Amino acid sequence: MTFDNVVHNFDRIVQATIESIYMVFFSLFFAVLIGVPLGVLLIITGPGHLWPKRWLHEALGMVVNIFRSVPYIVLILWTIPVSRALIGTSYGTNAAIISLVAGSSPFFARLAESAMREVGRGVIEAAQAMGARTIDIIWKVLLPESFPGIISGITVTAVALVSYSAMAGLVAGGGLGAMAWNDGYNSFKNDILFVATVLLIIIVQVIQWIGDRLVRRVDKR
Amino acid sequence: MTGTEKSWREGGTLAIIPTPDPTPEEAIIRFENVGKTYERRGQKPVEALKDIQLSIRRGEIFGVIGYSGAGKSTLIRMINLLERPTRGRVLVDGVDLATLSPEALRKKRMKIGMIFQHFNLLWSRTVFENVRFPLELAGWPKDKAARRVRELLAIVGLTHRIDAYPAQLSGGEKQRVGIARALANEPDILLSDEATSALDPKTTDDILALLESINRRFGITIVLITHEMRVVEKICDRVAVLDGGVIREMGTVAEVFGRPRSAIARKFVAEALSEAATGEAAPPDGVDDAHAGGASEAIAAKTLRLVFIGEVAEQPIIQRLIRSHDVEVNIIRGEIKRLKRTPFGTLTVRLRGREEALDSARDFLLGAGVIVEELARGDARADQTR
């Protein structure tokens, strides 16, 4: 195998790599922005927790499960009208981000929820005994105490987003996934297919490495 | 219910003087016909507490002893309203917490510290930040809070661990952090939920000594729940014995455990004594009943457990017994403990003599204020074969 095509298309490969990282980064940002509050709500509305609200708890759980059970490739199609309404087009990396956020927020919310479930009832009770409000307990107990778990949840979500973003790019255009498919496989340029794959693997490795280091730094248990 | 208060008489000898329960003015915490029933869907309701009447005096150390499931955890949590009574009311300084607004309840809770069996510290915070936590909740300015934290760490003797994380501390150190945290807002009441149950005996003693000194120095009323007799006898002024959601007995520690009337209190005393008596000597050979019976038809033997509390423990009663009665006294085992300020002795003796002499010896002991319990022959045999 020669890498002539890679050399000729070097600028486009760099461009696609940047697009992939861009998609992962911004969808991760919004997934965390939506997923953390959603995870908090899932936890505190649960039975016997800070703010038990049976119907809300079950409704949120159901919405999250629906989003998680729809295959991602189908979710992409469902979000096309949403992208048109929000950003005026269903094509490009920004359109891809909308479907990525829809797919990863509920996933991350569940990870955040299970991280916060690890915070003992005793600690919450102690905070209540000290006169903490529910909002104090969320900000000063639930979130800081589950921070290592939340960071590793973010890492897992980021890795999942790398592979989802390859699919999203394929439909909406942009990124290494689209490049591998269109310029690589469909154009019989196996070297481009190979290099795009290697780049995706490297992105995943780097994300995992950063995530593990961060968890180790913040975990005081 | 009437209790007795132990106090020092002039000249240093002990006296037991009867005192009534705290008057409403003396009481800082009052339970009025309090009950709690847990209702779970599809399950039979569970009655955790029944008709609790309790007054805790300002400045005392009050213990609630009971086995797990007795309801003590529910009882202590009603004082800061972590548990709501389903019947009756709990008054703290005359205020029923259940009637307060959320904001007023918060303010009130800040004046009631609490420590826990599993410490319940925040893993993500240093010792300093853990102790500062209640001050943050109360809205203290940063520099003032920092000064207060240092002061508290000095009280509990942890200044050198100020920047450590809880995971780096021993159990005893974690509980000291818990105590410092509980004292941060200068509470009037400190609730202790099995605070020494996860600690080894030596550390338990250290923590109990710290609690006692806090009680003395700051006049903080301490309410503690425990399943360990040693905790109660070490530091409590008064004790309630809880079983099946009911207070079976209540009074000063010397009274309740010196003259246990309820089966459950007797069980706690027996446990504490057998715990202390490990390694006891077996009675010497040849003093069993068969031997005594063989020597003379008229000679009999009895094994008695004698409990001496307070003043009684300081008198030469056995010497007087031997002088005034024609009996042989063989001491099988004995020990003296000290409940907070009251000596408390137990003696197991084998008396030999004629039946009438034995009966009159027994009456003499009872008359002198000793608690006499006759051990069955089976018990005596078991003692020997052990």
Image: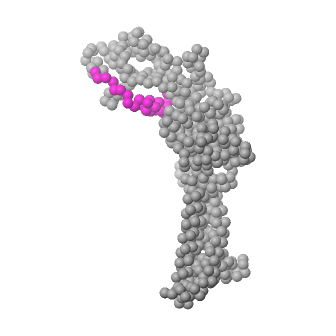
Residue B210 is left or right of residue B275, and the answer is right
The residue lying at 66 percent from left, 46 percent from top is B132
Q: Work out whether residue B341 or residue B317 is closer to the camera in this orientation and state it.
A: B341
Q: Count the marks: how many?
A: 0
Q: Work out whether residue A58 or residue A132 is closer to the camera in this orientation and state it.
A: A132
Q: Quadrant of the N terminus of chain B?
A: top right
Task: Measuring from the top left, give residue A221's x and y in whole percent.
Answer: 55, 53
Task: Measuring from the top left, give residue A86's x and y in whole percent.
Answer: 72, 77
The residue lying at 69 percent from left, 44 percent from top is B146
Stretch of the chain drawn in magenta: B260-286
Q: Quadrant of residue A46?
A: bottom right
Residue B265 among those drawn in magenta:
yes
Task: Measuring from the top left, give residue B73's x and y in whole percent.
Answer: 56, 42
When the figure is inspected, residue B18 is found, relative to residue B91, above or below; the finding is: above
Q: Quadrant of the C terminus of chain B?
A: top left
The residue lying at 36 percent from left, 10 percent from top is B326
Task: Measuring from the top left, give residue A94's x and y in whole percent.
Answer: 68, 77
Q: Quadrant of residue B17?
A: top right
**Way the structure is coloured:** one colour
- Residue farthest top in this picture: B324
Residue B206 among those drawn in magenta:
no
Looking at the image, can residue A180 be seen?
Answer: yes
The residue lying at 52 percent from left, 82 percent from top is A194
- Residue farthest bottom in this picture: A187
Looking at the image, can residue B64 be seen?
Answer: no
When the figure is inspected, residue A200 is found, relative to residue B305, above or below; the finding is: below
When the figure is inspected, residue A108 is found, relative to residue A190, above or below; the finding is: above
- Residue farthest left in this picture: B294
